[in-house]
Amino acid sequence: MATLRTEDWDAGVGSRSTHAGDTFVDLDLCETTLEGVEFDRCTFRNARFNCAEMTDVAFLNCTFVACNFFDATLTSCKMVGSSFERCSFDLLTADGGDWSFTTLRAADLSSATLTGLRLREADLSGARCQGATLTGADLSGAQLHQADLTRCDLRGSDLTALDPAATAVRQAIITPDQAVVVAMALGMDVRPA
């Protein structure tokens, strides 16, 4: 367990495939390519992942504080149990991967494109997802209380945890099958014609 900065990363820490319990402060990983690296119980403070490309990277039970993910691309990455506080996700693209049990309370995901993510029991309370893409996501058991899903593309996502009375869903894009789930959540008795 160590406190590391960009100069430590550049001096060889970045070549490790596993990091456990380390704290990364002011780490600059802009335009970096990472593949197959595992971070376990690490803390990232003021880290910059701008335009980074990460594939099969695991951030397990990590803490991110005031980090910037501008235009980052995450493919098949794991964020299981990780928490995000005051982070920026502008133009973030995440395709596939397991983000179960993540904490994204009040996160601004409005310009993010999240496809095929497993977000089981994730905390998205108060998340701002207006106009975001959140397709093919497993949101079962997710906390969506006071989240803003206005104009969000939710096609193919599991909406069984959605309470339309406690979540803004105006003009959200869904499929007919999802419309039935939402109607049932509103207490409607859906029957064939």
Image: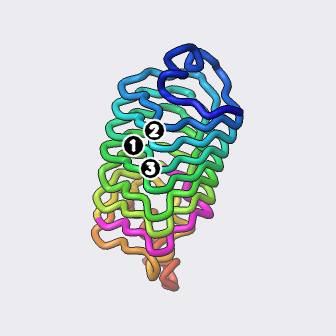
Residue 12 horizontal/vertical position (percent): 57, 14
Residue 179 horizontal/vertical position (percent): 42, 69
Tag 3–tag 1 contact (CB < 8 Å): yes
Relative to 170, 1 lies left or right = right
The residues bearing labels 3 and 2 have C-alpha atoms spaced at a distance of 7 Å
Camera-near label (1 vs 2) is: 2
User: Residue sitting at 59 percent across and 22 percent down?
Assistant: 36
Which disc number belongs to residue 66?
Answer: 3
Prevailing SS of the magenta stretch:
loop
Which disc number belongs to residue 47?
Answer: 2
Give the secondary structure at mark 1.
loop
The range drawn in magenta is: 137-150
- The N terminus appears in which quarter of the rendering? top right
Tag 1–tag 2 contact (CB < 8 Å): yes
Which disc number belongs to residue 68?
Answer: 1
Give the secondary structure at mark 3.
loop
What is the crowding at mark 1: few (fewer than 14 residues within 10 Å), some, or many (at least 20)? many
Looking at the rendered structure, the kind of residue marked 2 is Ala
The residues bearing labels 3 and 1 have C-alpha atoms spaced at a distance of 7 Å
User: Residue sitting at 56 percent across and 27 percent down?
Assistant: 56
52 relative to 142, above or below: above
User: Residue sitting at 52 percent across and 85 percent down?
Assistant: 187
What is the crowding at mark 3: few (fewer than 14 residues within 10 Å), some, or many (at least 20)? some
Looking at the rendered structure, the kind of residue marked 3 is Ala
Give the secondary structure at mark 2.
loop
Q: Which label's residue is closer to the chain start, 3 or 2?
A: 2
